Image (cartoon, helix red, strand yellow):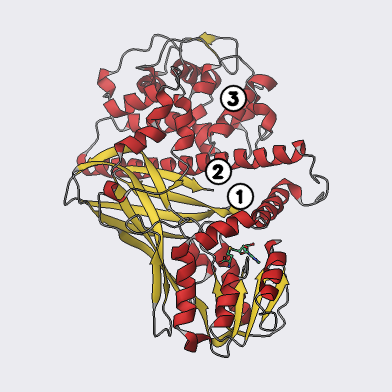
Amino acid sequence: MAEYADTHVDGVGVEEMPELSDGDDDDIADDEEQWQWLEEDSPSVSVTCLFCDRLLSSVPATLQHCMSEHQVNLVDVIRRHNLDDYGYIKMINFIRSTKCNASCLTGLPDAPLPWESEDFLRPVLQDDPLLQTDPEELCGDEGSSLSTCPSSGADSQDALLQRALAAEERARCSGEALARAMDDLHKLKLLAQGLVLNTETSKSSNLGPVAELREDEDEAYFSSYGHYGIHEEMLKDKVRTESYRDFMYRNPEVFRDKVVLDVGCGTGILSMFAARSGAKKVIAVDQSEIIYQAMDIVRSNQLEDKITLIKGRIEDINLPVEKVDIIISEWMGYFLLFESMLDSVLYARDLYLADNGSVYPDLCSISLVAVGDTQKHKDHIAFWDDVYGFNMECMKKFVVPEAVVEVVNADTLISEPTVIQTIDCNRVCLSELEFSSDFCLKITNTTDCTAIVGYFDIFFDKGCSNKVMFSTGPQVTKTHWKQTVFLLEKPFSVQTGDELRGKITVRKNKKDPRSLLVTLDLGGMTQTCILQ
Ligand code: SAH
């Protein structure tokens, strides 16, 4: 909780700590010391002990009492079982509802825990102050309080460094946990919608809820491509579509007499470009219903002899040929890797591409650039402070972890861009699509850095006499991919000439591999954003 965090920041020395006004007596001086740091700014509340009827005047006093009277160190329990917010809440409610005694905690096996059930999320006591306590703060600040003990130079520096690293790791984990929790909420929403709309909820009886949701999500993914609207948007994106067209029309020697596979053909536009630029045969595959329109479109343009359309997931179907010379695909998602459709292209490449064949586009890069746009930051974050006269501050914790896809005004850029990852589609393997990269942004303005923006560039390069590329960056004509904005929870000031060093980690969300988790380490903070 905030007040505990403040104690940490202030770095109160042991000798400055106030006497505890509550808790238990006798030979517990050491224990007292351990909890005193927590006591300092704790508001006086009434907390019922977890194991007896005693009322204590604060959360720290309760922790201390549990330790001295019941020999249970709750911080140890939290750490030992690596409890996140939910785990902690469930543990508290479990103890209160089962009225178990202290020994049931100390003798716990490593797994599974007796409070796994979601039922224990329901509070047993109304306004239970223990439930309003952040377990990470409890563990984290308790650790930091120990650092206020006098100790010798190098050792204490080492220890401080270790603690800082541990704190950083905890921050990263909690960011991820929050992002995952939000994702779960999103899935529950989908499930609830499904139930309300009375969709076929009984069909996948033996898949289990997660697989069921995943299957539903894939269904939702492909059905979103069944509607013409999304294809209209893509076709009207001239930067995108003309780049593919120019690459094929300006490099007919690449396509002449070649067998081409179009992974995810949609309306068939890329297949038709390929056919017109001299391909011998084009096989166009799509799982979504749009392929039925593509069949009409291909016929209307008298290309049915050249283009064979197949409905199905590329992973599920058999192609009518053993190998293809070229694979074309427009698989790119927000921040390049969102949607994970590149996985399907790599699957096709590894199974069907001839030895000297090529995948196009062949090269891609992901870049970051810093943004200073206090107004935008306020619009997204400070907005919740006062909404029609009401405080909705609690919403902020959901806003920061969600990356925003929007067009960034080039005037708000405050650094040179930097490439954080390049991908060669002819060589890359699946595992390389999750990565960490250190980066350095050269600052060009003295102002507050409020966000980091990501975008990608695409290159048609291999063997082309007329190379083609396009960018989705904020400095050039906008595309339907816009840019991906990672708002910083706490903007910080930067100066022209600064080199802002950071680290970015991009991973698939295990619970929904089509969404991405992006962790930024920057300016002394770590935050994880989800892109979904
Ligand atoms: N090539 C078209 C459409 C691109 S959108 C164009 O450039 O306009 C991506 C398409 O790929 C969607 O229609 C989607 O349904 C399809 N798709 C995605 N993953 C696929 C897979 N694994 N198998 C088959 N089709 C897939």
Q: Which element is circle 3 on?
A: helix
Rendering quadrant holding ligand 1: bottom right
Mark 1 vs 2: CB contact within 8 A: yes
Select label 3 or label 2 by which is in front: 2
Residue at the spot of label 1: 511
Select label 1 or label 3 by which is in front: 1
Q: Nearer the viewer, residue 272 or 150?
A: 272
Q: Amino acid at mark 1?
A: Lys
**Quarter holding residue 525:** top left
Q: Is residue 333 left or right of residue 310?
A: left
Q: CA distance from mark 1 to mark 2?
A: 8 Å
Above or below — where is 239 with respect to 161?
Answer: below
Count of numbered badges drawn on the protein: 3
Residue at the spot of label 2: 180
Q: Amino acid at mark 3?
A: Ile
Above or below — where is 512 with respect to 395?
Answer: below
Mark sitting on residue 92: 3
Assess mark 3: CB under 8 A from ligand 1? no
